[in-house]
Image (cartoon, rainbow, N blue to C red):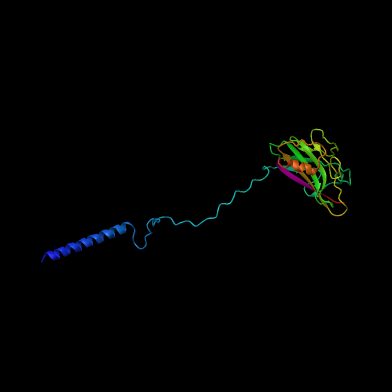
């Protein structure tokens, strides 16, 4: 009868060996209650990052090149009174102007002068275009000629004449007179007598830099 207990022992030993193998395999596969499911990240993997917003688009480039273009006059400063000599209360001659800091690639300049506070809407006082790139100043009292000596073409002012027309607001409140200078990458080659609107349309794709000097006047 000893064979029966021996066989029983052999069965028990076999079962114990099988259970030990299962435990070993389970441990090797990370089968404890805190382990990740098969195919998941390991316990040491970095946590999943939170969703982030889509990157914003880069800022739109400025329409004109960086420049230190400045416009000044020895007759008046920024937001100061234009002397009567340069208005309809005096000789109505064009004031002296000087500029500097144009981009090196400048090929021509345009000067536009207007009064945005005129009773009937913006009034144009001076339209001057195709000034050579070498120009850095205009003397006082330029003639009312279509073509200027040394270069430059004059267009029509708000009264229909050629050249500069001095400030002449109705008696009462002070008006602003905007002297706007544009540096262009090409000459316009327009005929004399163009309106401010026509010149503004022609320069839109050629502006390298621009600046403005504002004078004041009232009667």
Q: Where does residue 111 sit, x and y in percent of width and height?
A: 78, 41
Which residue corresponds to the image point at 80% horizontal and 44% vertical from the top-left?
A: 113
Q: Give the number of marks.
A: 0
On the image, the x and y values in percent for residue 72 come to 77, 43
Magenta span: chief secondary structure? strand
Furthest-top residue in this view:
150
> Which corner quadrant of the image does residue 16 belong to?
bottom left
Vertical relation: 37 (above or below) 177: below
The residue under the point 31% across, 59% down is 26
Residue found 75% across the figure and 43% down from its top: 201
- Residue closer to the observer: 46 or 4: 4
Image coordinates of residue 152 in percent, x first then y, are 79, 36
Q: Residue furthest left?
A: 1
Query: Residue 8, relative to residue 67: is it above or below?
Result: below
Please give the range of residues in magenta. Answer: 207-214
Quadrant of the frame with the N terminus: bottom left
**Residue 217 in the image: x percent, y percent?**
84, 50
Q: Nearer the viewer, residue 8 or 36?
A: 8
Is 199 within the magenta?
no
């Amino acid at each position: 009868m000893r064979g029966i207990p021996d066989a029983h022992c052999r069965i028990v030993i076999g079962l114990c060996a099988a259970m030990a193998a299962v435990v070993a395999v389970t441990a090797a596969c990370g089968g404890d209650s805190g382990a990740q499911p098969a195919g998941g990240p390991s316990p040491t993997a970095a946590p999943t990052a939170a969703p982030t917003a889509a990157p914003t688009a880069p800022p739109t480039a400025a329409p004109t090149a960086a420049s230190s273009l400045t416009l000044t006059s020895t007759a008046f400063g920024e937001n100061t009174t234009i002397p009567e000599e340069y208005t309809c209360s005096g000789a109505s001659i064009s004031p002296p102007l000087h500029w500097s800091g144009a981009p090196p690639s400048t090929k021509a300049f345009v000067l536009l002068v207007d009064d945005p506070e005129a009773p009937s809407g913006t009034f144009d006082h001076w339209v001057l275009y195709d000034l050579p790139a070498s120009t850095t100043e205009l003397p006082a009292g330029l003639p009312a000629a279509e073509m200027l000596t040394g270069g430059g073409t004059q267009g029509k002012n708000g009264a229909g004449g050629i050249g500069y027309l001095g400030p002449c607001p109705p008696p009462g409140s002070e008006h602003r007179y905007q002297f706007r200078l544009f540096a262009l990458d090409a000459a316009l080659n327009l005929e004399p007598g163009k309106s401010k609107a026509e010149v503004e349309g022609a320069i839109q794709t050629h502006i390298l830099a621009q600046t403005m000097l504002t004078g004041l006047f009232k009667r």
